Image (cartoon, grey):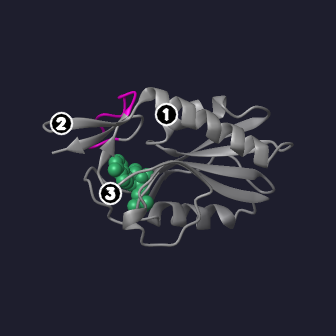
Amino acid sequence: MKGTLKPLISEEALRARIAEMGASIRADYPDDTLTVVAVLKGSFMFLADLVRAIPGEVRVEFLGVASYHGGTTSTGAVQITQDLRSGIDGHVVILVEDIVDTGLTIDYLCRMLQVRGPKSLRVATLLDKPTNREVDVRVDYVGFTIPDEFVVGFGLDLGELFRNLPYVAVYVP
Ligand code: IMP
């Protein structure tokens, strides 16, 4: 793929911040078993680091979502490609996203999960791009707030590429 990558968040910074996020999630729920629901595919790398930073009992579930269809602007349409394998009734749920941009995806997913009766539902995102927000969503844990640029790496893709980069970079076409 043509274009250049401008490093934005280093491996070291990611590791340190995710460790803090895991500790603060556990501090908020010291005694609960947490059901961590990861939104695929973009959050897989963040998820792997985050759950290792949360001590105590943790369940992991996956939710498959397609929202960008290969481009760099949001279509707003959220398509569920894989639902949870088990119920979350009475669970303490942490919904894990790679990035919140317009907020449409997380808003849709929160509504969808809320009707399933979790005891609590919170959102953790690695990256937050607040400039483009279209819906007022509550994001409880934010790794890094970034400017309105298209980023790749550490799970985030452009047309399915760059997910394997160990750091986050701005994609300059
Ligand atoms: P939202 O619905 O606009 O908040 O977009 C959320 C989804 O869009 C994320 O889960 C990503 O899959 C994708 N997305 C938004 N911004 C970026 C970006 O800068 N790089 C890669 N994917 C992005």
Looking at the rendering, the stretch of residues picked out in magenta corresponds to 157-167
Marks 3 and 2, how far apart in space? 17 Å
Query: Residue at position x 37%, y 66% from top?
Result: 132
Q: Name, please, the residue furthest toward the right.
A: 31
Marks 1 and 2, how far apart in space? 21 Å
Q: Label 3 amino acid?
A: Asp
Give the percent coordinates (x, y) of residue 20: 63, 37
Marks 3 and 1, how far apart in space? 19 Å
Q: Do the residues labelled 1 and 2 touch (CB within 8 Å)?
A: no
Side (left or right) of 82 relative to 3: right
Quarter of the figure with the C terminus: top left
On residue 91, which mark appears?
none
For mark 1, what is the residue? 14
Side (left or right) of 171 relative to 91: left
Does the residue tagged 3 have its C-beta within 8 Å of any atom of ligand 1? Answer: no
The answer to whether residue 158 is magenta is: yes
Dot 2: few (<14), some (14–19), or many (≥20) neighbours within 10 Å?
A: few
Dividing the picture into quadrants, the one containing residue 140 is: bottom right
Side (left or right) of 158 relative to 76: left
Magenta stretch, overall SS: loop
For mark 2, what is the residue? 4
